[in-house]
Amino acid sequence: MREGPFSYHISLDDRNPTHFDNHIIRSLSSMEGYFYDEAAYSSMLAEEDQVLYEVFEIKRPETVGELLQGISVIRPGKVGNEYFMTKGHFHKVLDTSEVYYCLRGHGLMLMETPEGEWALEEMKLGTVVYVPPRWGHRSINLHPDQELILFFAYPAHAGHDYKSIEERGFRKLVVERNGKHEVVENERWDQSS
Ligand code: F6R
Ligand code: ZN
């Protein structure tokens, strides 16, 4: 972790920031239970444990006042007809927000509150998405062959709570139908509420 003020550069040619402290790689095997089409998930995994997304984090002390930053890179692809996406989470300190800036690609930010209110924002080059306090969030790559690259920043003490989304998912799923994305109900969510 760096001391004092610093800068770094995000090169879109090799899409890695010139400085990062942590590199997270999420492959298909780490996403068990996240995609609704379990048969499609199993047959894809049997073929190859491919990488779905990566996160490069610029770490800061996890204290009030600090901002943790980084970029996430979501690969193009689908499990069945559901687009590649991040796991999604609430912040452990629920009352914390996050800002995303789209550097490449085409995607969606799916958001919901613990009470089940939901929202979807489209992301293209230059889009800024503000995720307010209390809103869980997941990034979804809609592009058939381009990576979705997002810069993010959030309070470093926020932490992550994956549990409820791991158990029941988001209220809505985003799937492809007739070449377009469509928002459908997640039956697992409905049954759990
Ligand atoms: C941090 C944040 C992003 C995500 C990243 C991967 O609060 O929202 O850095 O962590 O997009 O998504 P998850 O953490 O849901 O696997
Ligand atoms: Zn977050």
Image: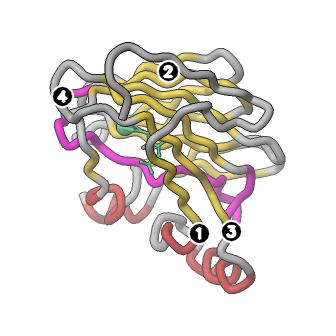
Q: Which residues are magenta?
A: 76-96
Mark 4 is surrounded, within 10 Å at the Cα level, by few (under 14), some (14 to 19) or many (20 or more) other residues, namely few
User: How many labels were placed on the picture?
Assistant: 4
Which residue in the structure is indicated by mark 1?
28
Query: Which is closer to the viewer, label 1 or label 2?
Result: 1
Which type of secondary structure does the marked residue at label 4 adopt?
Answer: loop
Which residue in the structure is indicated by mark 3?
50
> Which residue is at the front of the view, 163 or 179?
163
Q: For residue 108, which quarter of the picture?
A: top right
Q: CA distance from mark 4 to mark 3?
A: 34 Å
Q: Earlier in the sequence, mark 1 or mark 2?
A: 1
In this picture, residue 184 sits left or right of residue 130: right
Which type of secondary structure does the marked residue at label 1 adopt?
Answer: helix
Q: Amino acid at mark 2?
A: Val
**Point 54% across, 65% down: residue:** 35
In this picture, residue 16 sits left or right of residue 8: right
Q: CA distance from mark 1 to mark 2?
A: 26 Å
Counting from the top left corner in percent of width and height, residue 80 is at: 69, 67
Counting from the top left corner in percent of width and height, residue 128 is at: 54, 17
Q: Are the residues tagged 3 and 1 within 8 Å (C-beta)?
A: yes
Q: Are the residues tagged 1 and 2 within 8 Å (C-beta)?
A: no
* 62 over 125 or under it: above or below: below
